Amino acid sequence: MRELTAAGIVATPSMPLGRAGPFLIAAISWRNLWRNRLRTGLSAGGIAFAVMLILAARSAQVSGMATMLDNATRMVTGHVQIQNSAYRDDPALRNVISDATAVAHALAQVPDVTAVAQRAVTFALVSVGDRSYGAQVMGVDPDREREISSLPDMLIEGHYLEQPTDAVVGSLMARNLGAKLGDEVVILGSMLDGGVAAMSLRIAGIVDTGTEDLDRALIQVQLGALQDAFGLGDRVHMVIARVDDFTQVGSVVPGIESAMAPFGSNLTTLSWQRLLPELTQSVELKAVSSAVMFGLIVLLVTFSVFNSFMMTVFERTREFGMLLAIGMRPNGIIGVLQLEAVWLAAFGASIGIAVGGALIALLGHVGIPLGEMAGGMLRRYHLSDRIYPELDVGTLILAPLLMLCATQLAALIPALRIRTLAPVDALRAAA
Amino acid sequence: MPLTLLARLGWRNLWRYRRRNLMLFMAILVAVAGCVLVSALIRGYQYDMMADAVANLTGNLKVMAPGYRADPSIAHGFNLDPAFRPDIPADELIGWTQRVRVPAVMLSERETRGISLIGIEPKDERTISFLGSVEIRGDGLVDRDDGRILLGVELARQLQTAVGRRVVIITQGADGLNREAGYRVAGLYDAAGTAIEKAYAFTGLRPLQKLLGTGAITEVSVRLRDDRFSVLADSRLAREFDGLDVLNWRQLEPQAAAMFELADAAILIWFVILMLALAFGLINTLITAVLERVREFGMLRALGMRPGSVVVQVVMESVSIVMAGLVGGITIGWGLIVYFADGIDLSRWSAGIELAGLRSRLVPHLLWSDVVAVSAMALALGLLASAYPAWRAVRIKPLDALRR
């Protein structure tokens, strides 16, 4: 028995190779890998490239999506909405939530709900001077609204709602109406009982959300003023909540639903996934298209690893013949080769993770600028024009694992040749 | 050394290492087929998006008064000579039309919505915009004197109105005063997305002009057979309409134009990434191919093969594998495009694709310029990848090599 080396390798001349210890096999396979440095370097480079690319691209994508969804839900939608179950298909004035104050109070008691706000919404004719447009009039509670929505922070002129006669309008609507700060604005619509509702307000602020639909058609007023003018009393059209972590909203919904149960069956609880189906679906669509891309890259790198193992097996035929001749089982040799593939994948993936991680760290610091041209489009999708990626933990595990499986397969197919190798022929093979 | 002999040598060498070269061939094939298919899918998306943007009342080119975009009211209209015909050759022009487009409020018995009210020449409109290709329930508009109104299905649903019922329109006339008029619903159109259906209501050009108290129009829209004709057509229209704005679809739909350009960039990024992923395996295999044959190259050199011929031989091997992979990859990519000629069904993401500007079926659209780009990149990669092996092969000293 010779001494134990630092690497934990036990080498005993008397031990038959067929029963070599796992440390010895590991050490041999690691050394075998570096017998052809250039080849191993290139194969590992391919694996590193794939891991780096998948890690960086997926992290940027996940962060971009999270930023977008966060911005989008923060704008006006919120994370969860309570509505009359008829309201979603038919957003009419009469599809209300009665006892709004009680509903909002009950919603605020649900664990993980961090903020609650009520809104009444109706379509009405909005006039400034002799110009009129159709608009979505939204009655909000200004203090609550600040906790839920980023809209109060998007004022480009004036201030947010302070008095019952204040109105905040979208920038495009102000332009279309030819209105400026302080102008009188008249809202005409129909009351809940069918009578004529009229409000006379002053433009206190102008918002620019970057979202054309909102900027063109939104006007916000105080909730109480709207409820009075349209004869709504304590009725609203939506009670909106923010939760702790919007990605985990699914686990909060059951609690909300049970809290809403005492208020009758005509209320429905909608999470942001259902309120913004287009965003949820574009997340899925992106995931599908990037899966195709990642699949192709993994396949290409696998071909490369396959080729390099095929060349390895071919070149080492004599060596394998010798090992077989002195009693190593074919499966043992295959095991060594598979272990070489593990080392290769681990080595390549480590480099990929290091480079990819550094790249993400750098980009997370400076942000990915999304370009001048794309700016308008991105604002429309509620994206800020820079993405600050964070390392996506799921991909950090998945990408190396994927490459490990791919390299195992790429090594196994050429290695299986060893089972049909006759030691004597193999020993005679050209070096 | 004659090139034909080198070619024969190269050809035989390819078959000496059949399995390895087959794998390399397969890798190139997958990369090239992937590039071809993906570029065709992205082009399909890109061209659908452009076609939709153009058909969405935009046209390739539009003539408007300078103030209209900032303040879309009839006050920013202009008069069009009744004898006007755009000075664009017939083989470049699909059609053109004039419109009056004003913002308006629409009221039904139950609901109120803000819309864009558009006075059209139905016959011309159908040749150039989406109205020609959508399904219309009810009569639709008959001619430019038709005083009824055509609504989107979604708008009618929200207003809770139907064909034959009446709606009221409030809009601003040419004198700045509000006009109110009742319209009978002539029909409902079913466009691809609800965004269009909610936004546009159509009526005859003449009755709308009468309501607004004007003979003016707000826009002339021109649809061309190909967007590349628009540069010339733009300058012709600019000459005809002195003092008015002539805008192309990129200026009118900047978001769609931005996506169009992003798609160009996406294709290029795809190509580069797939080629890089391919490069590792290609270089690996080519280097081994040279190092394995050190003795052989030494022998050839000893027999009098010049270094230049050695380089040619190595490069030729590499290039011929790449060529074979290219031909195979393009064939398979093209086959996949033919297979998907009916389009890939994306309807399960119906809301998401509307946001992304996609249609419910994505039909691949192969551009030969993309195929040329892939081929050029793959060949350049093949040449680059053989540079180091070729250099190694040239450095082989005949005597040392033979002694090994």
Image (tube, coloured by chain):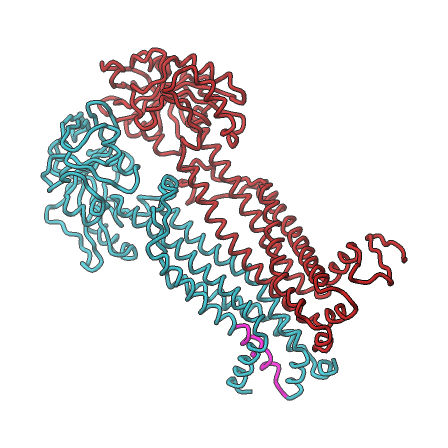
Chain colours: A red, B cyan
Q: Is A324 on the left or on the right of B248, as rendered?
A: right
Find residue B177 and report its horizontal and vertical position in percent: 17, 25
Kindly identify the residue that appears in the image at 37 percent across and 39 percent down.
B351
A228 or A303: nearer the viewer: A303
Q: Is B142 on the left or on the right of B231, as rendered?
A: left
Kindly identify the residue that appears in the image at 12 percent across and 37 percent down.
B215
Q: Is B50 on the left or on the right of B182, as rendered?
A: right
Q: Is A363 on the left or on the right of B64, as rendered?
A: right
Find residue B352 and report its horizontal and vertical position in percent: 39, 40
Residue A125 drawn above or below residue B326: above
Residue A193 drawn above or below residue A307: above
Q: Is residue A394 magenta?
A: no
Q: Quadrant of the C terminus of chain A?
A: bottom right
Kindly identify the residue that appears in the image at 78 percent across and 67 percent down.
A327
Write the start and end of the magenta stretch as one range.
B304-319
Quadrant hosting residue A88: top left
